[in-house]
Image (tube, grey):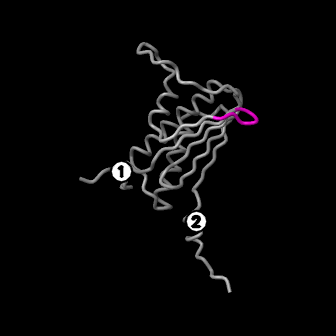
Amino acid sequence: MAAVVPQDELLVDRPIVSAMALDGSEPIAGARHAARGFMTAVQAEHGIPVSDRAMSMVELVVSELVTNAYKYAPGPCLVDLEVRDGAVEISVWDTAAQLPAASPADAGRIGQHGLEIAMAVCRSFEVRREPVGKRVKVTIGLADDPGGHPAGRLL
């Protein structure tokens, strides 16, 4: 006879995901708001600690990547958020085939720092071509402390 596993236990090893389809007419603030809502739910409904830093970085990176998609790619973009293994993976797909590249350092340059910011604050950064367009994937750790405490290192 097969053992019955409580429904809550089935979700423990599964990633927690959210997906947004944006047509380019929505305000970028809406994508930030949806990302914050998702991360808040991860903490409140699933009991996974999310540091204030991680919450802010998720909003910032979603904002920067969606801004780039709106600015450089015609048509829609898709934003996927996936939490697993103590991190959130942010994936943004858009229709432009050209891969983004960080601009050379220039102290006088105004703007065009979004990709540099995303690369600096993320644990990992990946860009790849898709059959249509491209996908940018980044990973942000949920805890500030390598030991996992969401408030950071305890002294």
**Crowd around label 1: few <14 · some 14–19 · many ≥20 (10 Å):** some
The residue wearing badge 2 is 11
Q: Nearer the viewer, residue 28 or 132?
A: 132
Q: Position of residue 46 (x, y in %)?
A: 50, 61
Whole-percent x, y for residue 9 in the image: 56, 71
Query: Which segment is the magenta one?
Result: 128-133
Please indicate whether residue 90 sits to the left or right of residue 56 in the image: right
Residue at 53 percent of width and 24 percent of height: 102
Q: CA distance from mark 2 to mark 1?
A: 25 Å
Label 1 SS: loop
Q: Quick check: is 13 in the magenta stretch?
A: no
Identity, as a three-letter code, of the amino acid under mark 1: Asp
Instruction: Examine the residues drawn in magenta and state their main secondary structure.
Output: loop
**Element assignment for label 2:** helix
In which image quadrant can residue 73 be found?
Answer: top right
The answer to whether 4 is drawn above or below residue 145 in the figure is below
